[in-house]
Each structure stands twice: as C-alpha cells, then as structure tokens.
C-alpha cells in the first residue's frame, strides 16, 4: 500500500467507499490540489487525478502521485485512460476549472485528458462537478455564463464561487470537500424542516458595552450545514457569532437572549421536524440597561437576573419534533457530566449533547461530547463537522 493511503478515513467516513476523479486545469489554484486530494481522502474517498498540459506546467504530476498514491493521467494512451477513469468514478470533480476547460466542455471541444474524461463521463451518466477559478471579469463574461448555464442543463453541478479581491477564488479544500459530500452523501432529510440556534447572545449594559461569551457559533453552523447537505429546509437563528453562515439556509439574525427566544418561537410555530438548540445564550442578563455610557473610574453595581429560556416552549410548540439540547459544564467528571445531561433530557428533550468546556470546545474546531438519549450514551471526539454528522444521524435514529 502506498504510504499516502494511510490517511484514508482519518477525518471520518463521509465519503467512505466513494471514488473521485480529480481533474486539474491550468489555474494558479492548482497549487491547492494536493491539499484538496488529501482532504477528500481523509474523509474516506479514493482519489485519482487527471491533468491538462497547462496544469502540468504549474504543479508536478509527481506531487499529485505522492498526494493520492495513484498514478496520474497526463496523456491518453492505448490504455484508454479516459474511459477507465469515467467507468471507475462515482464523481468527476474538476477543481480548479478554468474558463477554457468549461467552455470547451460546453461547446463540444475535446483536446485534453480532462475534457476527454468529462466527455466520457457525461455520456455514461456519471455525476460531474466543477469548481470555477478565474478572474471575475472572465467569470462575468456572457459567454462563460452562457456555457455554465448550458452545463447546468446537462446536469453538471457547479460550486458557487468565492469572490475575493475581484477574483473567483478557489475555495478552501475543506469547503470543496463539504460540497462533494453534499453531492455524494445521503439525501435522507428531503422534505424536513430543521431549526438550528447558534452563536452567543449579547446583552446591552450601556449604549456601548455588551455582555457576551466566547461562543463562535461553529457547532451550530456545522449542524445547519449538515442538515442542508442532506436535503432539509434549514432555518438558522444566529446570534453574534464569528463564523460565516452556510449558503442555502435561511438566516435569522438576533442579538439578545430575549430576541433569540422570540424569533426561535416564531420559527417553531411554523412547524419543524428537528430542532437543534446549539446556541450559547446568556444565563443571566442585567436587570436594567444604563442609558448613558459608563465612565472609567465610576463605581458601578449591576444586578443580574435569570435570562429567558430559549427552549421554554419548544415541546409545547412542537409536540412531535425531535428536540436536541446542548448542556455545557465546566471542570466536572465524566460521571457528573452524564448525570447533568440526563437531568437535561428529563426536561422534554430527545437528545442531549453534553460537554465539559474546561477541555476546550468553545471557539475551537475540536470538541469532546457525550450524546445522551433514551438509547443510552456514547462519547464522541473530533472536529465539529464530524460531530455534526454524528449528532444529526443520532437525531434521525430517534425520529424513526
């Protein structure tokens, strides 16, 4: 076994058993392809690479051979590599895809190994996805837009571009891998409506100052993204977190705990199949807000009162939905954490995700949690994207 194969599935099995042909075109974004190939492999996919001559001038095929552990196709021979790859693949992913290659593909011009694979794959009915990378002026060109529409009409999936500095930038490898998971992963949540709360809340102390916490919103964002990838209609009730909401979800922006409660209840009153209360709202709020700015040197006494509970009416509004709560403790034993999660479960929730913040989690991409339900409890550790997948799958088990 090639040493690079040792990373297969190291970040979970979202693409386990999937076979992906990565087509690389002559864009400077080709420099991201070793990392992209290995990100796909870490999620369980087998990856083989085909390159255009222009791509070979930018990065060495030997580098992609090392990255994937597979021989790289740079020219077609009597082995009819384009047919072999197309028949083998579950997905043809062209990333980066230049204006040149996508326009040739749309107009029926085949003169590189990548276009040959695309032609064969389309004829075989294999899924095809493109990740455009070019200057924004080229992307906006009517001919390019017309060609993209034609390809979409053929069933080709196109990843929405990341626009930065006037260019259609190549997304981070993790984003491309998530896009691929959305194409190849299960669509078992189509027809479901899902509500996710995420991020912190902020309480006004005076016209300038607020009281908040260090929650980034990353866990809730990951849950919203996972549900959307599985086909659900997703509503994200989002406090002032630092993470960017995922595309394709309805985002309801809130600031205070009272506002989060009000807007979440509004969304729950419209119906939902699953609700994930992943936000970190304030437990206490100032009894009153100071009307003027508090000045340095002035002694201040602030009285705090319990904040409204965002989850208070959840079971009343959604008697048949699966309700998932999060329980955060600090500096407790595992037994104490599970006990606290069990107590939370008794408040009318179907699943509780419990974690000890003294071990990290808040503001980090890594977390350790216990999933606690009527089915028992189990410990999970990993990146929040991987945990989101496990939490959603557990919630779906409870729904069946």
Image: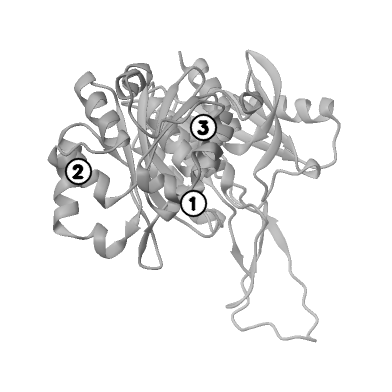
- Left-right relation of 389 to 359: left
61 or 294: which is nearer to us?
Answer: 61
- Residue depicted at 78% across the width and 26% down the height: 339
Q: Secondary structure at mark 2?
A: helix
Q: For the N terminus, give its image quadrant.
A: top right
Could you say which is closer to the camera, residue 177 or residue 386?
Answer: 177
* Category of crowding for the residue at label 3, using alpha-carbon neighbours closer than 10 angstroms: few (below 14), some (14–19), many (at least 20): many
Crowd tier of the residue under label 2, counting other residues whose Cα lies within 10 Å: few below 14, some 14–19, many 20 or above: some
- The label on residue 348 is none
Frontmost residue, 158 versus 116: 116
Mark drawn on residue 238: 1
Residue drawn 45% across the image and 13% down it: 400
Give the spatial CA distance, label 1 vs label 3.
29 Å
Circle nearer the viewer, 2 or 1: 2
The residue drawn where x is 37% and y is 21% is 89
The residue pinned by badge 3 equals 40
Q: Is residue 150 left or right of residue 176?
A: left
Q: Residues within 10 Å of mark 1 (few under 14, many from 20)?
A: many
Residue at numbered disc 2: 104
Q: CA distance from mark 3 to mark 2?
A: 27 Å
Gap in Å between the C-alphas at discs 2 and 1?
42 Å
Q: Is residue 60 above or below residue 374?
A: below
């Amino acid at each position: 076994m090639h040493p690079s194969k040792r990373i297969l599935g190291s970040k979970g099995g979202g693409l386990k058993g999937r076979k992906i042909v990565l087509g690389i075109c002559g864009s400077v974004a080709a420099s991201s392809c070793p990392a992209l190939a290995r990100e796909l492999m870490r999620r369980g996919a087998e990856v083989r690479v085909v390159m255009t001559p222009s791509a070979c001038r930018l990065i060495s095929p030997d580098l992609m051979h090392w990255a994937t552990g597979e021989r790289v196709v740079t020219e077609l021979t009597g082995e009819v590599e384009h047919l072999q790859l197309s028949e083998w693949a579950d997905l043809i992913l062209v990333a980066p895809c230049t204006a040149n290659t996508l326009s040739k593909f749309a107009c029926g011009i085949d003169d590189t190994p990548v276009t040959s694979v695309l032609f064969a794959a389309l004829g075989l009915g294999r899924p095809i996805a493109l990740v455009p990378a070019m200057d924004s002026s080229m992307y906006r060109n009517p001919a390019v837009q017309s060609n993209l529409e034609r390809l979409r009409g053929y069933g080709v999936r196109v990843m929405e571009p990341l626009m930065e500095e006037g260019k259609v930038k190549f997304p981070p490898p993790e984003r491309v891998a998530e896009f691929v998971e959305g194409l190849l992963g299960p669509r078992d949540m189509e027809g479901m409506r899902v509500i996710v709360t995420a991020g912190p809340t902020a309480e006004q102390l005076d016209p300038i100052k607020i009281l908040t916490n260090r929650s980034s919103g990353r866990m809730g964002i990951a849950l919203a993204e996972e549900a959307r990838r599985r086909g659900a209609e997703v509503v994200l009730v989002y406090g002032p977190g630092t993470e960017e909401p995922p595309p394709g979800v309805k985002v309801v922006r809130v600031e205070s705990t009272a506002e989060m409660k009000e807007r979440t209840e509004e969304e729950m009153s419209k119906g939902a199949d699953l609700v994930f209360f992943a936000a970190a709202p304030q437990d206490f709020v100032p009894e009153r807000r100071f009307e003027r700015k508090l000045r340095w040197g002035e002694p201040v006494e602030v009285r705090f009162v319990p904040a409204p509970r965002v989850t208070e009416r959840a079971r009343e509004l959604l008697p048949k939905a699966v309700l998932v709560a999060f329980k955060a403790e600090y500096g407790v034993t595992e037994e104490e954490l599970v006990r606290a999660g069990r107590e939370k479960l008794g408040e009318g929730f179907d699943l509780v995700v419990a974690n000890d913040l003294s071990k990290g989690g808040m503001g980090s991409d890594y977390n350790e949690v216990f999933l606690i339900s009527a089915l028992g409890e189990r410990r999970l550790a990993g990146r929040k994207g991987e945990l989101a997948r496990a939490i959603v799958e557990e919630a779906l088990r409870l729904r069946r």
